[in-house]
Image (tube, rainbow, N blue to C red):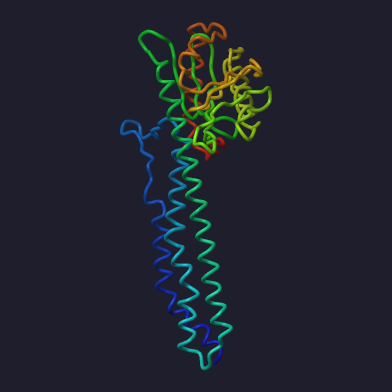
Amino acid sequence: MAWLEYLLPLIFLFPLAAAAVIVVALRNLHDARVRSPFDAQPLREPGQALRNRLDRAFAGLFLDGALGPIVTLAPLVYGMGRMLFSHQQNWIEWALYGALCTLLALVFCLLLIRDFQRIRRLKLGLACELAVSQELERLIRPEAHPYYVFHDVPGDGYTIDHVAVTPHGIFVVETRARTPVLTPGGREVKVVTVEPERLRFPGWSERQPLAKTRQATRWLKSWLEHQLGAAVPVKGVLALPGWEIDTRQALDDLLVVGGDDLARRLAATLLGELDDATHDAVISALRQRASLLDLPPLQGPSI
């Protein structure tokens, strides 16, 4: 029967299929998330949302790198089986198997390139967020100053990088990572001009970072007012680690900083006065909100 010539070669694909099943089963073998030994709650570090995305990116890299050779070899192995069971050689068919192998190899090469670029962007974003987090830690002096810093606070469909509670107001801190421009002579150009609605980098401009920071600030201000029953002073901060900031054209509703002097700038910015009861209520509300991070899958902010 002619159809057996196409069915029997599938036997040669069983080892490849078994290997593919093992690869898929092991794709989440590395999971960096840990839970507290005291209450079994997930432990969060600064940049935890980006850490989770980085873990998923490495899992995707493992999957593409391991499945690529298996899937690419499948047409070739099937074609070899066809040669054993076929009564006559059809060179057009063999050429199609070869072309399919080549196409699959190109597809997985592109997927690996995409994975490497994604991991590189996430690492840069995580490095910048950790740098800003370390700067924010200077605010925390429990015995002398009533400061409190939250990391990765769930917002309305996104994650706020940091929220700093000070005696003089609440600050929404968003971090964005951008690579400085290199001149033909190898000199770094890292001056960004802040305009009312956009950031003007050397060679390009962006509107989304300012818009996202304003959106997060408005949301947190409205949410806190709903939780506390009274308005509290909230200001948005956009941190661009490694950049020199020109704010001569900027509006005063946001604070745009390079990140290295963030703690000093926040301590010196007086938005208003928070009494002890309001201060404690804000911290309690944010603690409850931060505990929701690991319940629904939230999308992290763009970097």
Query: Foreground residue, 238 or 67?
Result: 238
Q: Quadrant of residue 211?
A: top right
Q: Residue furthest front?
A: 185
Which quadrant does the N terminus fall into? bottom right
Residue at 48% of width from left, 40% of height from top?
Answer: 122
Residue 215, image x and y in percent?
A: 63, 26
Residue 252, image x and y in percent?
A: 64, 15
Residue at 54% of width from left, 29% of height from top?
Answer: 190
Q: Residue furthest left?
A: 37
Residue 248, placed above or below residue 17: above
Query: Foreground residue, 38 or 130?
Result: 130
Residue at 55% of width from left, 22% of height from top?
Answer: 172
Which quadrant does the C terminus fall into? top right
Q: Residue furthest right?
A: 197
Query: Foreground residue, 82 or 186?
Result: 186
Residue 220, image x and y in percent?
A: 59, 22
Q: Quadrant of residue 18?
A: bottom left
